Amino acid sequence: MTYVPNNARYQSMEYRRCGRSGVKLSAVSLGLWHNFGHIDPLENCRAILKTAFDAGITHFDLANNYGQPAGSAEENFGKILREDFRGYRKEMIISTKAGWTMWEGPYGDWGSKKYLVESLNESLKRLGTDYVDIYYHHRPDPETPLEETMSALDLIVRQGKALYVGISSYQPEETQRACAILKELGTPCLIHQPKYSMFDRWIENGLLDVLEAEGVGCIPFSPLAQGLLTNKYLNGIPENSRAARHLGNGAMEEDQITDANIAKVKLLNELAQERGQSLAQMALAWVIKDPRITTVLIGVSKPEQVTDSIRCLENYSFSGEELDRIESILK
Ligand SMILES: NC(=O)c1ccc[n+]([C@@H]2O[C@H](COP(=O)([O-])OP(=O)(O)OC[C@H]3O[C@@H](n4cnc5c(N)ncnc54)[C@H](OP(=O)(O)O)[C@@H]3O)[C@@H](O)[C@H]2O)c1
């Protein structure tokens, strides 16, 4: 049966301007790091993407190495794009990245122009698209001159293979330098993708100020600390949860579910209940409450999690008292 998207999808979602650019992103974006590889059921991937698009999510985040095996998330997304979303490419913002190890030898990692250009060519083949909307350098490279990495991003835009560029996990000072180089090249930095959640607050120490001053958007990843900031681990480690799957590659492991963390999660869960939200919704609301955050980048293992998480937009204001209580729980 041909997929017909929900007609009302743009009414229920909020769209926020990305920094001082011309483009707006859905306030919730969907990432395909996990659960979209060849090891995962394709029909679940399809159902998640349809649920997200029906709810007004326009931004889908990928990287060259997403999925197991690496690259398979792009392949599956490309397949579903062709089979179900034909005609809707223009309504989507699709991103991909390069920066982590992708293939053997000296040109399959880090930040050389060679790697970034070759990797995007491969990503476009897997995705089956002519261009991506956003191309990121995935992590800073201490050895390659920043000028080379940024000029690779600029080149790719000039080649028409990406419309915008971004950086991920760059520290404040290197973000400032990257923005200055890109500005001079005539391809401004659109967006920064850092890790950020109640459990990881590093971007509050300078990065958000830099992004605001530079007019660059912010899309925090792992806003639920990979699932820890939900009620799922309150009574042990459920089968099929991310922690139980031992996926490697930065995925959370059981040893992150410590008694100290769970004690905090319990208290946060009580507050969420008082606010009439699930803990996942409150944790996402807490991220999106800051106007410097453009969109919160969620990951899901099933369509119901999209529906649940997206309701964070129903209430993302916090009283001073609630914020103080959160701070004292997190201390
Ligand atoms: N730039 C980078 O270096 C980088 C690094 C990491 C991630 N990312 C991006 O950020 C995206 C999101 O990262 P993430 O997957 O770690 O995000 P996350 O939102 O912190 O964690 C997602 C996991 O939380 C659980 N979950 C989600 N919604 C839930 C709900 N409503 N109720 C209960 N549990 C829920 C699910 O766990 P279960 O699987 O256990 O059900 C899901 O797989 C990635 O897909 C990727 O696009 C970027």
Image: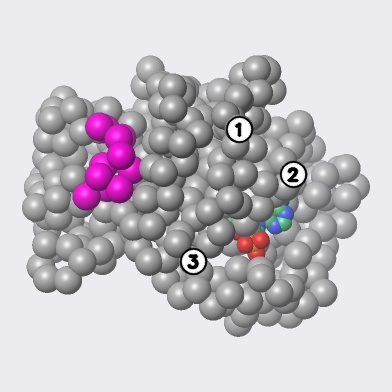
In front: 9, or 40? Answer: 40
On whether residue 125 falls in the magenta region, the answer is yes
How far is mark 1 from mark 2, CA to CA? 26 Å
On whether residue 6 falls in the magenta region, the answer is no
Image point (18%, 28%), residue name: 160
In which image quadrant can residue 232 be found? bottom right
Residue 227: x %, y % from top left:
65, 61
In which image quadrant can residue 13 be found? top right
Image point (80%, 49%), residue name: 278
Residue 240: x %, y % from top left:
66, 70
How far is mark 3 from mark 1, CA to CA? 25 Å
Q: Is residue 319 visible?
A: yes
Looking at the rendered structure, the secondary structure element under dot 1 is: loop
* Type of amino acid at the residue the image marks with label 2: Asp
How far is mark 2 from mark 3, CA to CA? 25 Å
For label 2, count other residues whose C-alpha is less than 10 Å away and answer few (under 14), some (14-19) or many (20+): few
Q: Is mark 2 within 8 Å of ligand 1?
A: yes
- Tell me where the magenta segment starts and ends, as one range: 122-132
Residue 47 - label: none
* Type of amino acid at the residue the image marks with label 1: Met
Residue 308 - label: 2
Q: Would you name the residue on which mark 1 appears? A: 1
Mark closer to the chain start, 3 or 1: 1
